[in-house]
Amino acid sequence: MVSRTLLESFSTESGRYVELVHVLAERALVARYRGSILGVYWSVLSPVMMSVIYTGIFGTAFLQYYNNSYWHYALAVFTGMVTFNFFSGATSQALTSVVHNGGLLNKVKLPMSVFPVAIIVANCFQLVVGTLPLLAILTLWQTQNPLLVLALLLPLLAMVGVCLGMGLLVSGLYVFFRDLPYFYEIMVAVLSIATPLFYPPEIIPPRFGVILSLNPLAVIIQVVRGIVLEGVVAWDLMGTALMAGGLLLLLGLVMFQSWRSHYMDLL
């Protein structure tokens, strides 16, 4: 009887949490794209334009690493850009979500984690509607294998785990350190250089290889590129990516919950 009551209580709380995430994610999307012509498809246009620019500037220099094909190089840049842009956009928006809703939290009792989670969910919707269909089309065009389209969901799932964990972590830290957005902007810029977005990982000196292997974004991008460009699923890297996503999500959850008792005094 007690276990049944607990289960019903958990089910009710979970349903309320999901409903809150849905409402807040929808509100974030409406506010972001109100009056916009392209809406979520801006998330595709930006990396397409950057891919064209990088191909024009660096394509010839790195062509030997991509089967001497400008098309392969452009695809490699595009897959890297859409993955990194999702991470940087989602986590940067999640960073301020708790503090910006401090007034609401002081009036209504809500689970604080719902705000960064809703931001990540909103960006996931943008990814699924805007970017994923194009990645699926490119994968089918390159490989003629529909199963590889399904395989794309695994590295993207790892990316969602990374974003959720980092979003929870930075949104919690921002409550204590209001200079964090400036530092995080620098960190993302450094990370964009440390991640092989427009250059092949083969040119990185071996002594820095360990640093690259610790970068979950680099691993995820390698997996996505292998699927889209070569029709190959690197299961060892896939396992590493999923493990990194799970560990970062766990870290974010633990740290966010451990700081929760101090939030209301600072909001």
Image (cartoon, grey):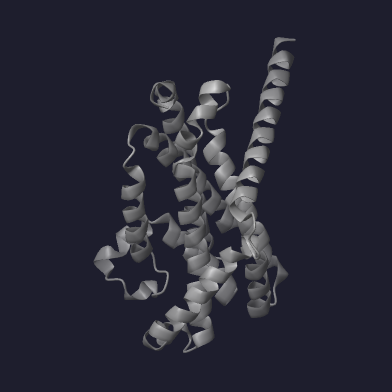
Residue placed most toward the observer, 51 or 72: 51
Residue at 44% in and 43% down: 95
Residue placed most toward the observer, 41 or 187: 41
Residue placed most toward the observer, 162 or 167: 167
Q: Quick check: 70 left or right of 4? A: left
In the displayed structure, 37 sits above or below 267; it is below
Q: Residue 192 in the image: x percent, y percent? A: 38, 63
Residue placed most toward the observer, 218 or 54: 54
Outermost residue toward the front in this view: 35
Instruction: Please state, as top left, top right, bottom left or bottom right, where the C terminus lies in the image.
Output: top left
Occupied quadrant, residue 197: bottom left
Residue at 32% in and 60% down: 190
Q: Residue 182 in the image: x percent, y percent? A: 32, 49
Occupied quadrant, residue 5: top right
Outermost residue toward the top in this view: 1
Q: Quick check: can you spot residue 63? A: yes
In the displayed structure, 239 sits above or below 252; it is below
How many marks do you count on the picture?
A: 0
Occupied quadrant, residue 57: bottom left
Residue at 67% in and 40% down: 22
Q: Residue 84 in the image: x percent, y percent? A: 47, 61
Outermost residue toward the left in this view: 207
Q: Residue 66 in the image: x percent, y percent? A: 46, 83
Q: Quick check: 63 left or right of 130? A: left
Residue at 42% in and 62% down: 218
Q: Quick check: 266 left or right of 141? A: left
Instruction: Please state, as top left, top right, bottom left or bottom right, where the N terminus lies in the image.
Output: top right
Q: Quick check: can you spot residue 245? A: no
